[in-house]
Amino acid sequence: MDYSWIQIAVAAVFISTVITLVLSRGAGWLSPTFWRNAAIVSSLVMTFILLWLTFDTAGQVRPGAGHVPDWTVINYEIHLVWDNEKRRQVPAVGAETGFFGKTWSEEEAFDLINKGKMTLQSRNCMECHQILGNGAYYATDLTRAWLDPWWEERIMPLTGAKTREEAMAAWLKNPPAMPQGPRKMPNLHLNDDELKALIAFLKWMSAIDTNGFPPRFGVIQ
């Protein structure tokens, strides 16, 4: 399902009005019967819509279906493309590139991404950063961190890394050694396994269709 909230609201009002008028035929709009029917019908219609949206959302946010990518997406190139119909950027999956020189199975990728999420939570990253709109505004939004051109334009030349993931690992190993602005990120003392897992989580996160959030990411105004 790909309807806007306005379309759903208009449809709910239209359906409720039609059913109320049919049930209340012969009764004026000032009649208690009319308003009793309106209250009952609108409640039933909205209950149906909420149940429908609940089951639809559950399907959309399941990995591998709808807006959320499969775990193995970390094995592929990820970028954003402009969708003229939706009028927003959407993630696109390209050629297989591997991740840290390896192609990860679904089980391996799940374990790695899950470890990355736990690593992010253990370091309380959202005290400074945002993810999917949640968190603080002191530092950069991490929702599309993997796709930030900053890694290729500045960090890869600085570290000599050959791939984006290697550049991220080199910088995250000790951010204070390579400050990139007045707001300096502390050393989180991540070991190699934690670094690899955290970067996998950020890459997987970048492939989620977030309905255009953050807006016009990486697009020069």
Image: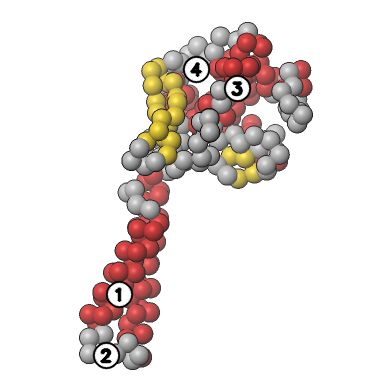
The residue identified by callout 4 is 99
> Callout 4 environment at 10 Å: few (<14), some (14 to 19), or many (20+)?
many
Q: CA distance from mark 2 to mark 4?
A: 68 Å
**From what the image shows, is residue 155 above or below residue 201?**
above
Task: Give the label on residue 27, or none.
Answer: 2
> Where in the figure is residue 220, as x and y percent of width and height?
53, 30
| Amino acid type for the residue under numbered disc 1 | Thr
| Amino acid type for the residue under numbered disc 3 | Trp
Tell me whether circle 2 and circle 3 mark residues in contact (CB < 8 Å).
no
The residue identified by callout 1 is 17
For the point 39% across and 26% down, which residue is it? 93
> Where in the figure is residue 82, as x and y percent of width and height?
40, 33
**From what the image shows, is residue 71 above or below residue 131?**
above
Left/right placement of residue 83 relative to residue 157 reads: left
Image quadrant in which you'd find residue 83: top left
Q: CA distance from mark 2 to mark 3?
A: 67 Å
For the point 41% across and 30% down, which residue is it? 81
Q: CA distance from mark 4 to mark 1?
A: 55 Å
Q: Between disc 3 and disc 1, whose residue precedes?
A: 1
The chosen color scheme is secondary structure
For the point 39% across and 44% down, which residue is it? 60
Task: Give the label on residue 150, or none.
Answer: 3
Residue 197 visible to the viewer: no
